[in-house]
Every structure is written in C-alpha cells, then in structure tokens.
Image (cartoon, grey):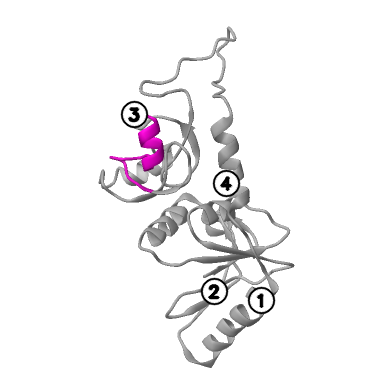
Amino acid sequence: MLVSPYNRFWQHLRNELTLALQRRVPITAIYRDDEPSEDMEWLLGMGATVISVDRLHAKLFLNESYVILTSMNLVETSSKNSREIAIRVDGGPNSVAVRDYVHKQLIPLGRRVELQPLRSKVADARTQPDRSRPNAKGISAPARSGSTGLGGRCIRCKGSIPFDPAKPYCSECYGFWSQTQDRAFIELCCHRCGQNATTSFARPQCEECYSANR
C-alpha cells in the first residue's frame, strides 16, 4: 500500500511495481485528490486499486510485515536530492495504529478512482491518425520497418510508441528487459490497443488485436 500525496515515479520504481503486479501482488495507491497524476492512471491501468483523498498530506508505505512513516513523496527529485527521513515499524501497537488510520480513516474518506477515464484515452488514441514529425520540407518521415503507421503502446509501462510488434517496448523498458532478454516474460498490456492483457516480447498483442492484424 502506497500513501503519497504527490507522485512522479522514476523508471526503477515503475519497474519494481510492474514486477510486483506480475507476481499478482495487490497494490493500493492513495494520493491527494487535487493532484491528478499520470502515474496514478498508469497504476490504475496496470490493475492496481487507486483512491484519492481530499487534502492528503501523509506519506506511509505498508506491506504484510511492516509499515514505514516518512517525509518523502514518491517523486524522483525527492529520491535523488531531498533530505528525507523514515521510520520503519515492525509489528506492535504502533504498527496497528498506522494500519487502523489508513483502513478506518483514509480509505473510508476517499474516492475510488475508476478505470473508465483511462479506457477513454486509450480509445481516443486508437482512433487518432499517426502524426509523424515532418522533416524540413514538410514531408512526413516514413514509418520505421515493420510498423503499420498506427500508434502503439509499450507492453510494460503503457507509454505511447510507434506500433511495431518486433519492438514492443519503449527505450527505457527495453533497457530493463534486455538485461534478461526473456522473450516469454509476462507483461500486462497489449502493444496495439493498450488494454490490460497477458503479453510478452514474443507475443506482444492481445488475442483480439493479433487476430485482427493477421
């Protein structure tokens, strides 16, 4: 469980959250209601539970074993530049008190964010024509080899990339995947439609998109 009002995830954090979700670890993220975040939308699309809470300022991180109380938001600049402090509590009454605060005060006062807004964005992306960047003469550069010209999604982070089944990762996620180069490693997003689906480097599209694209 991640309680952080302000969120600007860095790539290593996204990778770890992705791996946790692939292990079927349930993740709940709670953030400040007036701080819309692309990272919360990304977590929602990956299958996590996302809750917004008005005027949230607490920073708490919980798992089955312990809780962490900290001054740090999940913001990359904080992880690199800020002076932060944290206290880890392993069980006991203090741990129970923190868990009760989250489950009995934050969550009941919050609003569960639904997936529909994200689906609408994905649907819009599928209907928009590809707008390749024009060159100096105003002529669009040709699509790269293997691409159909349609927009695609990175099968790990859901970022927008050119559609090319031979290259279904963005550059950052490809760098992480290339450390093992496991072609069967399970991802959670279709490269073509961006919907949640069991995919991999070897099979980057959901069944519906694969059948439609044959």
Frontmost of labels 4 and 1 is 4
Kindly identify the amino acid type of the residue bearing the numbered disc 2: Ala
In depth, the one of 125 and 7 nearer the eye is 125
The residue that label 1 is drawn on is: 108
In this rendering, position of residue 182 left or right of residue 208: left
From this view, report whether residue 191 is shown above or below residue 188: above
- For label 1, the SS is helix
Asked if disc 4 and disc 2 are in contact, CB closer than 8 Å, the reply is no
Label 4 Cα crowd, 10 Å radius (few <14 / some 14-19 / many 20+): some
The image's mark for residue 178 is none
Frontmost of labels 3 and 1 is 3
Frontmost of labels 3 and 4 is 3
Kindly identify the amino acid type of the residue bearing the numbered disc 3: Arg
Frontmost of labels 3 and 2 is 3
The residue that label 2 is drawn on is: 86
Sequence-wise first label, 3 or 4: 4
Kindly identify the amino acid type of the residue bearing the numbered disc 4: Arg
Q: CA distance from mark 3 to mark 2?
A: 52 Å
The residue that label 4 is drawn on is: 119
Asked if disc 3 and disc 1 are in contact, CB closer than 8 Å, the reply is no
The image's mark for residue 214 is 3
